[in-house]
Every structure is written in structure tokens, then in C-alpha cells.
Amino acid sequence: MLGGKQASPTGQGTIVGTNVKLIGTLQDANDIVVHGQIEGEIISNQAVNISETAFVKGPVSGEIVSVAGKVRGAITATNKLEILPTGKVFGSITSKDISIRSGAIFVGKCTMPNEEKEETETESATAQEGGKNTKKDTQYEVE
């Protein structure tokens, strides 16, 4: 369906129609496609597709998340997040792979977890234990 993924043979997933307004938590082990409105949390073990007609107010999490509509809330994609040209995201985003297409709107904080950060933190802790702090602290004041 998204990113070349096939639907799981155990189920088709969930589709929220254009005229549907759902309040609460939507959770599915398979793909979720939203065309309507959701106020609440969306959780999938696979892909979440927020279509052009969709509006989501609340957190979204999935392996692959694609946004063509509007999301007000945090998005966590364990594998990939894509904000398409018609997509509007207002909230923090977290993913290893992020694509924001020209024309898309993103207002919020972006976090890209990686293995290098963990290695740097370990090296810094080792240097501090050895009695030398190799980290330089810099403070800035804004008036």
C-alpha cells in the first residue's frame, strides 16, 4: 500500500471514510487509511495514511506515516514519515527517515533518532569519568 508494502494477509486494515467523524483511539495491527476526521490517537503496527480530505487532532504512530491532509498532534513513525505537498502538520515529529515535500506545511519540533547520538553520549561519559571533561559548555543570553 504505502512505500511498496503489501497489506498483511491476516487482515485488510482500517479505512475511515470521508463522511466519518471518530472520537477516541483508533488502533489496528494492519494499515490505517483516514479520509475523514479523527479526534484522538491513531496507532498502527504498519502504515498510516492521512489522505488529502482528512483532519486528525491527536497523536499518530505507525511504522510508515504519510500525510496529505491536516494533523494537529505529535507524529511518530518508526521507519519513515512523509509529508506530501498538500499535507499540513502542526506538532512534533519523530522518525529515522523524514521527507517533507515542497508545498507542505510543518510547524513544530523534529527529532531524528540515530545511533551516532548514542555513541557520542557514551564517549562523553567516558571522558568525564576519566577526570577530564572534553565537553565545552557555552551559554547564550538573548535580550
Image (tube, helix red, strand yellow):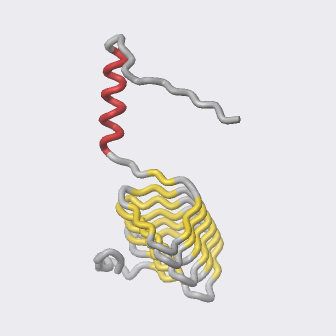
What x and y, as percent, mark residue 22? 63, 76
For this view, does 22 lie left or right of residue 30?
Answer: right
Locate residue 135, reporting x and y percent. 40, 24
Q: Measuring 51% from the left and 75% from the top, which residue is drawn there?
A: 103
Foreground of the two, 33 or 79: 79
Q: Residue at x 36, y 77 (%)?
A: 2
How many numbered discs? 0
Image check: 3 left or right of 55? Answer: left
Q: Residue at x 42, y 61 (%)?
A: 77
Q: Quadrant of the N terminus?
A: bottom left
Q: Camera-side residue: 126 or 43?
A: 126
Residue 54: percent from left, percent from top: 57, 80
Q: Position of residue 91 (x, y in %)?
A: 58, 59
Q: Quadrant of residue 31?
A: bottom left
Residue beneath the point at 60% across and 72% down: 56
The answer to whether residue 87 is left or right of residue 2 is right
* Image quadrant containing the C terminus: top right
